[in-house]
Image: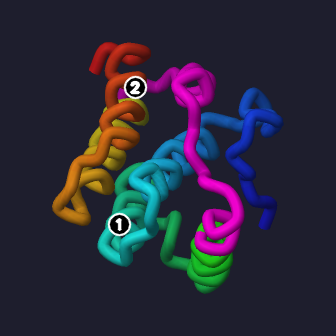
Amino acid sequence: MQYLVMTNTCNLNALNEHEAAVALIAATVVADGKIDQREVDELKRQMTMVLGPSANRSEAFDKNFVEFLNYLRAAYQKHPLKLSGEQVETLATKVDDIDLQIAIMNAVIEVSYSDDEYHTHEKDIVSVLRDQWGV
């Protein structure tokens, strides 16, 4: 599994719309400066909503998902994984399908509130997506 390292040098333009969706939702998990288990649980639930029920039914998905979360945790310990407004805009432009845009927006909001707090950086992601997509 190839991991998205969310830095200014990452080629976000190379992502397809589903990879952009995952990146936006995962960035929301770490946007508040910590990784809360409730956010992780909500992220997994939202992957089913955004990518469809087959997205996380396989053993391979579970293994890759756990590896991805471990990567997020390890990478976050060294470098914060915060997307800039420009990076969020770049990812948002990758998603043309209105239904997918709505699903991503819902997922980002659900993940944001899953730890019972709505942090500034989470609000920033929502704000950019709202402005970019008009949803």
Q: Is residue 41 magenta?
A: no
- Give the magenta-colored segment's residue range: 73-99
Q: Classify mark 1: helix, strand or loop.
A: helix
Residue depicted at x 33% and y 25%? 127
**Tag 1 or tag 2, which sits nearer the N-term?**
1
Q: Is residue 104 left or right of residue 21?
A: left
- Amino acid found under the numbered disc labelled 2: Leu
- In the rendered image, residue 26, in percent from the top left (x then y), is placed at 51, 54
Secondary structure of the magenta portion, mostly? helix
Q: Is residue 105 left or right of residue 56?
A: left
- In the rendered image, residue 48, in percent from the top left (x then y), is placed at 40, 62
Q: Classify mark 2: helix, strand or loop.
A: helix
Residue depicted at x 59% and y 21%? 86
- In the rendered image, residue 89, in percent from the top left (x then y), is placed at 54, 22
Quadrant of the image for the C terminus? top left
Separation of marks 2 and 1 at Cα, in angstroms: 19 Å
> As displayed, is residue 67 above or below residue 54?
below
Q: Which residue is mark 2?
A: 129
- Amino acid found under the numbered disc labelled 1: Glu
Q: In the image, which disc is placed on residue 39?
A: 1
Q: Is residue 10 left or right of residue 59?
A: right
